[in-house]
Amino acid sequence: MRKYSVRKRVLVTGGAGFIGSHLCERLLAAGHDVLCVDNFFTGTKDNVTHLLGKPHFELMRHDITFPLYIEVDEIYNLACPAAPIHYQYDPVQTTKTSVHGAINMLGLAKRVKAKILQASTSEVYGDPKVHPQTEAYWGNVNPIGLRACYDEGKRCAETLFFDYHRQHKVRIKVARIFNTYGPRMHPNDGRVVSNFIVQALAGKPITVYGKGAQTRSFCFVTDMVDALVRLMESPDALTGPVNLGNPHEFTILELAKKVVAMTRSKSRIVFKPLPSDDPLQRKPDIALARKRLSWAPTTGFDQGLQRTIKYFSSGSGAGSPARPGRSPAAARGRASRSGSAARPGKTPT
């Protein structure tokens, strides 16, 4: 008689990305079979090369705006460009990834009766008028601004998740991820932590937008992965949304000065105009995560920042230059022509 494995089969979309690759590591260490799906628009094989020889890890090139026909027990849906320089390159495709991608992954979850977690974002709050932000806050988002493709795409994805839950009884989890940092960040994606570190290590001017008075709070990537896993493993009644992030808040100018000091750089700080719709304040209220997940960040910012600086200074973060180079359309073409399980046809709903 055939013996079936008790391992969970877990799909991680966007698994070759910054957070996704750390999540794949964590799931493998927990003894699961992990299928990493990525179209490599912003993710890179370098992030998961060390996992390729592991017997319970599989890598598939695929764009989730196309349906995916596989058998899994859990789905972590992390696929979407998350940095402005990337998601504004092809805003229509960004919206499609959030919306069509959510429909396809929810359709898959419905068909195979899998539990599915959506990596939403603090950007659903826009430029908040409530501080700190709680899950009950509906946000202040410009629906026609330059960032709307990402902000509104993620908001629509949340809507789809809850409608599939109500209408089709799909087991869902929605995580609102706040600023996250750590090794494997893309070196040239314009995110503030990686941007400052790369500039400081190269001795280039540190670019601060506005007066640097806008605030952020940063969560180290391993803490974030721990929160995502805890949310996935929580009782089905906890659907979310749940804020995940570090509530310790400081200004961008304070961050710039800290990076200069920790890298012992001679870089000077220069100021440029504030980008359109850039939030002035961002800080999560994580009371719900503390209560329901028994979770809070444990990595101090100085400790995490030192580990991130070490990653970039070792040359590991050299990576490919910020493109977007090959277009998402080309990536989709490669996905449909690859040997993956993707195939054209009716979208599963």
Image (spheres, rainbow, N blue to C red):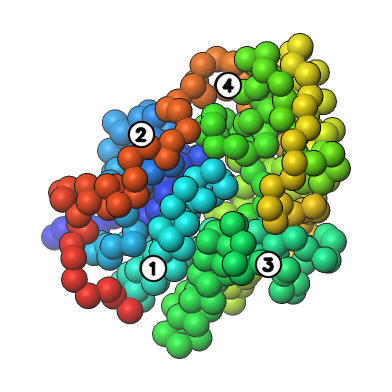
Label 2 sits on residue: 45
Discs 3, 4 touching: Cβ within 8 Å:
no
Residue 97 or residue 218, whichever sits in front: 97
- Residue 119 percent across, percent down from the top left: 54, 58
Discs 1, 3 touching: Cβ within 8 Å:
no
- The type of residue carrying mark 2 is Lys
Q: For this view, does 240 lie left or right of residue 163?
A: right
Q: Is residue 80 above or below residue 18?
A: below
Is residue 331 at least partly visible in the picture? yes
Label 4 sits on residue: 312
Q: Nearer the viewer, mark 4 or mark 1?
A: 1
Q: Mark 1 vs mark 3: which is more N-terminal?
A: 1
Question: What is the CA distance from the residue labelled 3 to the residue labelled 4?
Answer: 33 Å
- The type of residue carrying mark 3 is Val
Question: What is the CA distance from the residue labelled 3 to the residue labelled 2?
Answer: 34 Å
Discs 2, 4 touching: Cβ within 8 Å:
no
Mark 3 falls on what kind of element? Answer: loop
Label 3 sits on residue: 141
Mark 1 falls on what kind of element? Answer: helix
- The type of residue carrying mark 4 is Phe
How crowded pointer 2 is (Cα within 10 Å; few <14, some 14-19, many 20+) is rated as some
Residue 61 or residue 257, whichever sits in front: 257
Label 1 sits on residue: 100
Question: What is the CA distance from the residue labelled 4 to the residue labelled 1?
Answer: 34 Å
- Residue 30 percent across, percent down from the top left: 46, 45
Q: For this view, does 3 lie left or right of residue 273?
A: left
